[in-house]
Image: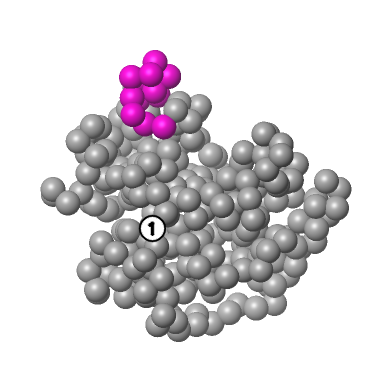
């Protein structure tokens, strides 16, 4: 455990100095990534050709600003593609976006526990992603297994990558409280809070199809509801029309095919 923590800290310091030393120029989008996106990212597949080009540019901008490293694994192209897609999807409705509270991402091969250990024997190793605090401030840790599952299963209303980037967006005002003040106009704050409490009560009373983890607290509700919004927008609009409409305003994206 000590070895893993020391390794993580060393990598995080390397990430920090890497960003200071290199303000990398945005590299051109590799043409063969288009097919990989079509095969693996439903959101991208549903975009028009023009918007796909914009998505590509936003991905490369993100990758020029954030350092990604593998922990006991060699990074593959698809790893970077899925991480960048996870980052761009929630903010694609805005002309320009920079994750000012993120400098680096560590990709673990599997789910991990609170001590950053991963493997299959310990049932406590069930964390798929976290946004760091304290010494891990401005860092994100993701499980490759969870990241890939989020894009492979397009019907479960769940996506770990998107979930963690929603937490980052929520944290931009220095409070991870389920109220994304950078996205939600002031007049919607009170209606949003009222809706959160109503929906969380339904979740905790087993009267909702929103994933149960969304009933944990306001921050987790925002992240879980946002996963649902981006993974199954038509179903969310049908089952939770009020929630769908306020998330449309929040993310400046109307994803329902019936619109």
* Picture quadrant where residue 31 is located: bottom left
Q: Is residue 136 visible?
A: yes
Q: Outermost residue toward the right?
A: 2
In the displayed structure, does residue 145 sit left or right of residue 44? right
Is there any visible trace of residue 114 in the rendered image? Answer: no
Q: Residues within 10 Å of mark 1 (few under 14, many from 20)?
A: many
Q: Position of residue 120 (x, y in %)?
A: 68, 43
Q: Which residue is mark 1?
A: 89
Q: Is residue 70 left or right of residue 147?
A: right
Q: Quadrant of residue 51?
A: bottom left
Q: Residue at x 75, y 67 (%)?
A: 14
In percent of the image, x 70 and y 72: which residue is there?
Answer: 18
Most distant residue in the front direction: 121
Residue 73 image offset from top left, x and y in percent: 68, 64
Where is 193 relative to 14, above or below? above
Q: Is residue 207 above or below residue 172?
A: above
């Amino acid at each position: 455990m000590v070895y893993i923590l020391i390794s993580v800290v060393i990598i995080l310091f390397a990430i920090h100095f890497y960003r200071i030393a290199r303000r990398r120029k945005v590299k051109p989008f590799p043409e063969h990534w288009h097919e990989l996106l079509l095969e693996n990212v439903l959101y991208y597949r549903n975009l028009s050709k023009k918007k796909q080009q914009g998505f590509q540019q936003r991905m490369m901008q993100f990758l020029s600003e954030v350092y990604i490293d593998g922990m006991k694994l060699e990074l593959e192209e698809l790893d970077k593609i899925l991480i960048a897609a996870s980052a761009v999807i929630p903010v694609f409705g805005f002309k320009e976006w920079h994750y000012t509270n993120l400098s680096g991402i560590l990709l673990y091969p599997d789910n991990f526990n609170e001590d950053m250990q991963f493997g299959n024997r310990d049932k406590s190793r069930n964390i798929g992603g976290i946004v760091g605090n304290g010494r891990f401030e401005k860092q994100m840790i993701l499980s490759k297994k969870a990241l890939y599952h989020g894009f492979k299963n397009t019907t479960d209303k769940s996506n770990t990558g998107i979930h963690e980037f929603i937490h980052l967006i929520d944290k931009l005002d220095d409070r991870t409280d389920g109220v994304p003040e950078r996205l939600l106009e002031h007049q919607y704050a009170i209606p949003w809070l009222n809706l959160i409490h109503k929906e969380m009560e339904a979740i905790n009373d087993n009267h909702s199809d929103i994933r149960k983890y969304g009933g944990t607290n306001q921050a987790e509700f925002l992240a879980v509801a946002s996963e649902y919004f981006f993974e199954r927008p038509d179903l969310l609009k049908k089952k939770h029309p009020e929630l769908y409409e306020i998330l449309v305003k929040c993310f400046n994206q109307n994803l329902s095919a019936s619109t």
